[in-house]
Amino acid sequence: MIKKIAIMEQTNSNYSIIADYYSEHYNELKLYVMSRSLPADEAEDIVQNTFVRLLRGDKMITPVTLPCFVYTIAKNLIIDYYRRKHKIEEYEHFLGATDWMGRYDVDGESVFSAQQINEMLERGIARLTEKRSKVYRLNLFEGMQVSEIAQSLNLGYKAAENRLTLARKEIRDYMKKELAS
């Protein structure tokens, strides 16, 4: 009980230290983030996310360590922002360089509904062996990882992994064939 109270006091102390630092240094940190060529609205988001991460963290925070944490987190969020931006630009460039309309005939007959695709998938799963089907269904519909599947079916990890790999390959080949026709 005493330990729990001490932890709560430490947490409240951390919150007050972070709140004080936020109110005193918000504009300074925002200028730092904006100096890295970010627009003002993105800079505000990064500054706010920096403090949210600090509040959610469980590190011991003191007035001495807080500035280091703040600028390290902000720097990492800036890097994440540019990585995301680069990936999006790469994808947009790919989409712009690809002639999607010329490649696919979008006349209504070539577009499959989700129900049709689901039915194709079910037919594909029905073609699998019982063991592969069971593993594939647990992974796809239950969201279970290979280790969880192995444990629930009393299989070795490698056996479950191999069954899932082979099932995925069969389903992939079947779906390609069905969607092409």
Image (spheres, rainbow, N blue to C red):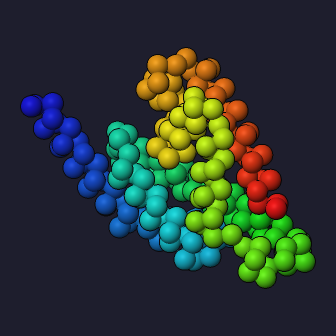
In the rendered image, residue 26, in percent from the top left (x then y), is placed at 43, 67
Pick the front one: 1 or 69: 1
On the image, which quarter does residue 157 sit in?
top right
- Rendered view: 81 above or below 55: below
The quadrant in which residue 51 appears is: bottom left
Residue 102 in the figure: left or right of residue 7:
right
Q: Position of residue 24 (x, y in %)?
A: 37, 66
Whether residue 68 is visible to the viewer of this picture, yes or no, is no
Total labels: the figure holds 0
* Residue 53 showing in the rendered view: yes
- Residue name at image x 81 percent, y 70 percent: 95
Could you tell me residue 179's position as x and y percent?
A: 77, 60
Task: Residue at 40% x, 58% y: name it.
Answer: 52
Hey, which residue is sitting farthest left in the picture?
Answer: 1
Q: Is residue 103 left or right of 143 when viewed as pictured?
A: right
Residue 86 sits in which quadrant?
bottom right
Which of the image's four quarters has the C terminus?
bottom right
Give the image location of residue 130, x and y in percent: 57, 32
Q: Residue at the location (46% across, 43% down)?
A: 142
Q: Residue at x 68, y 33 (%)?
A: 165
Vertical position of residue 172 compared to residue 97: above or below:
above
Q: Is residue 81 left or right of residue 172?
A: left
7, 178: nearer the viewer: 178
Please state which of residues 141 and 110 is positioned toward the viewer in this rendering. Answer: 110
Quadrant in which the N terminus is drawn? top left
